[in-house]
Amino acid sequence: MGSVKNMGWLQSFVEQYGVLVLILIVALAFAGIIAPGVLSVSNLSQMTVFGVEIGLIAFGETLVILGGGGGIDLSVGSMLALSQIIIAVLVEHGVNVALAAVIGFLVGGVMGAFNGFFVVQLGIPAIIVTLATLYGYSGLALVLSNGVNLSVFPPGFDVVGQSNVIGLPFQFIAIYVPVAIVMWYITSRSLFGYHLRFAGTNERAAWLSGINVAWVRFRAYLITGLLCGLAAIIQSSRFATARPDAGSTDNLQAIAIAVLGGTSIFGGQGSIVGTILATAVVTVLSYSFGYANINSVIETGAIGAVLIVTVIGQTMIRTVMRRRRRLA
């Protein structure tokens, strides 16, 4: 009986993540070929640092898309930029850096809530709302910073983004891993996660079942904003600088990671484990291409190719698994 359960679990894992695990292995091998030395312990540690911020943002994007209704957030990079500029401006005006960081984190939540209000309460398509706020938040970051980087953080703030714990980056061990566990619980074990998936799968059925679909989706946008605020704290600490153009490539990359990880763009299907694996794939490729000093255009094309191959591979595996189950 136990072996049957184990086989069922293994089959389910292969069906959901088999292609991603294979592509991650191939990406690591490819990285070792194009950038000899990139797989050293120190570089793998740096790679981990490189993936924390986009990984946190991708968690939020996964939630928003999972809730269905055309949910998407194109403004995640701009929320990150504005949050860290607000932190820097507060510090510049004499506010304690810890308090400024908390305020920046909460401002991220306010921006996410602003997106959610216009999408779920006013019924404006998410792609329109978040495209508008992408430019709005980015523009406000430029205005507040006068278009320049702000290096105003006191000594000690760099602990969050530059220190190590048991030989691993602090932000990975103390922030990313706990957040990943919480996000996994939220999406896989909590009532909110169940409601979010139900809303994404069949909005009308969810509503008839007594689920407040609008409130569920609003919370997804709110959490996404908070995660962007958290990523802003980490990034500004890592560089000891707040940049108004920070996160400019994160808007589409976070969506790509969520989809690469198996989150259906139509909602209702996806997982945090898939998003973690997809983040690892994108991080390995991005870091190794940068390490080898290869043109970013080629990097973008490579990530696009991986996305296509993964989606096709996952579709084929699921089709084969369904046929086997029917025959059984």
Image (cartoon, rainbow, N blue to C red):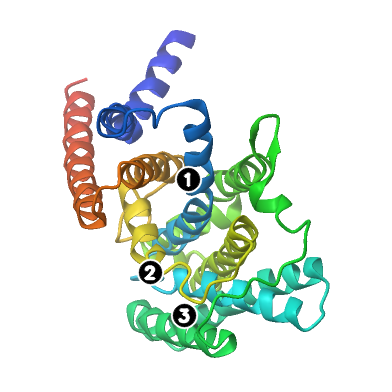
- Front in this rendered view, residue 203 or 100: 100
- Vertical relation: 28 (above or below) 65: above
Image point (49%, 69%), residue name: 217
Q: Looking at the picture, how far across and down is residue 32, in whole percent?
A: 31, 28
- Vertical relation: 59 (above or below) 34: below
Image point (78%, 56%), residue name: 156
Query: Identity of the amino acid at label 3?
Result: Val
Q: Tell me the crowding category of disc 3: few under 14, some 14 to 19, or many 20 or more residues within 10 angstroms, Cα based.
A: many
Image point (55%, 65%), residue name: 228
Q: Is residue 187 visible?
A: yes
- Front in this rendered view, residue 256 or 206: 256
> Which element is circle 3 on?
helix
Q: Tell me the crowding category of disc 2: few under 14, some 14 to 19, or many 20 or more residues within 10 angstroms, Cα based.
A: many
> Which element is circle 2 on?
loop
- Front in this rendered view, residue 225 or 13: 225
- Front in this rendered view, residue 224 or 207: 224
Query: Identity of the amino acid at label 2?
Result: Ile
Disc 3 target residue: 120
Horizontal relation, residue 226 to residue 53: left or right: right
- Figure quadrant of residue 318: top left
Label 3, label 1: how far apart the Cα atoms are: 23 Å
Disc 2 target residue: 72
> Which element is circle 1 on?
helix
Query: Identity of the amino acid at label 1?
Result: Ile
